[in-house]
């Protein structure tokens, strides 16, 4: 009996740590997305400005850091956050299924929103999109619409193709739904979701997710309709 109690306590502590890890890593990813979105919007300043911004990312922090050094530190931190986020989500999902093999017949609407239903499949779509996005616009390995050493031209060449833009918009929509639920859940895990704050947190999560969705889809749509060329 004592052994069972100790095991349950360890499992509970581990679950708390995993939830906290998932919350903190998710909020770090959300903060990075905001910075990434702001950078993407510089495409409206023209090719020279956008390409100079892309080059600046590789020299920021120099000479205190080697060229691209600070950028790689940010990438490693982001990658670690993504891995920690996915690992925590998978382990918690498996534990939840083992603890509750029979699904509830009724659930509260507040707890089971459309966003929460799509977290798993949305997360899978996001993972596929991230790999494609990195190969296309960061590594310059694949080149729909034509290859180019110019980041601006890679963006324009790619998003002139309707299915590339459609895939991007669909993936960003999944990111928005993921963020809407994730921000609310993350703040709740970290103890901010008190009764008097629930409404404000819900609105904040919705506003942040909506702004990120709009901010990310404006550039590719602008390219598709010819506003940016």
Image (cartoon, helix red, strand yellow):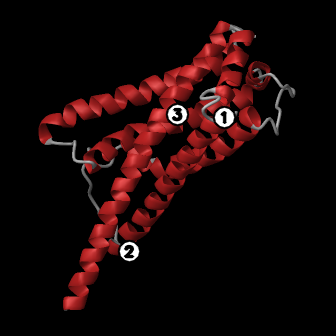
CA gap, disc 1 to disc 3? 10 Å
Mark 1 or mark 2: whose residue is earlier in sequence: 2
How far across and down, in percent of the image, does residue 226 sit? 72, 9
**Can I make out residue 198 in this image?**
yes
- The residue positioned 31% from the left and 41% from the top of the image is 184
The residue singled out by tag 3 in the image is: 173
Q: Which element type, helix, strand or loop, lies under badge 1? A: helix
The numbered disc on residue 98 is 2
- The residue positioned 53% from the left and 46% from the top of the image is 77
* Label 2 neighbour load within 10 Å: few <14, some 14-19, many 20+: few
* Label 1 neighbour load within 10 Å: few <14, some 14-19, many 20+: some
| Quadrant in the rendering for residue 151 | top right
User: How many numbered circles are shown?
Assistant: 3
- The residue positioned 65% from the left and 47% from the top of the image is 128
The residue singled out by tag 1 in the image is: 167
| Quadrant in the rendering for residue 43 | top right
């Amino acid at each position: 009996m004592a052994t069972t109690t100790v095991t349950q306590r360890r499992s509970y502590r581990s679950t708390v740590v995993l939830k906290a890890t998932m919350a903190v890593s998710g909020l770090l990813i959300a903060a990075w997305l905001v910075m990434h979105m702001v950078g993407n919007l510089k495409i409206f300043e023209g090719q020279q400005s956008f390409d100079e911004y892309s080059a600046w990312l590789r020299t920021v922090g120099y000479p205190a850091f080697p060229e691209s050094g600070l950028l790689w530190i940010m990438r490693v931190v982001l990658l670690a956050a993504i891995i920690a986020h996915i690992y925590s989500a998978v382990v918690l999902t498996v534990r939840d299924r083992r603890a509750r093999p029979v699904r509830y017949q009724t659930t509260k609407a507040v707890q089971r929103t459309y966003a929460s239903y799509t977290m798993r499949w949305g997360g899978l779509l996001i993972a596929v999109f991230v790999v494609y996005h990195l190969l296309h616009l960061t590594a310059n390995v694949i080149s729909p619409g034509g290859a180019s050493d110019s980041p601006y031209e890679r963006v324009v060449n790619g998003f002139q193709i309707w299915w590339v833009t459609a895939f991007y918009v669909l993936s960003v929509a999944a990111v928005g739904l993921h963020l809407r639920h994730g921000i609310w859940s993350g703040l709740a895990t970290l103890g901010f979701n008190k009764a008097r704050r629930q409404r404000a947190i819900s609105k904040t999560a919705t506003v942040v997710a909506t702004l990120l969705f709009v901010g990310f889809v404006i550039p590719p749509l602008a390219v598709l309709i010819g506003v940016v060329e």
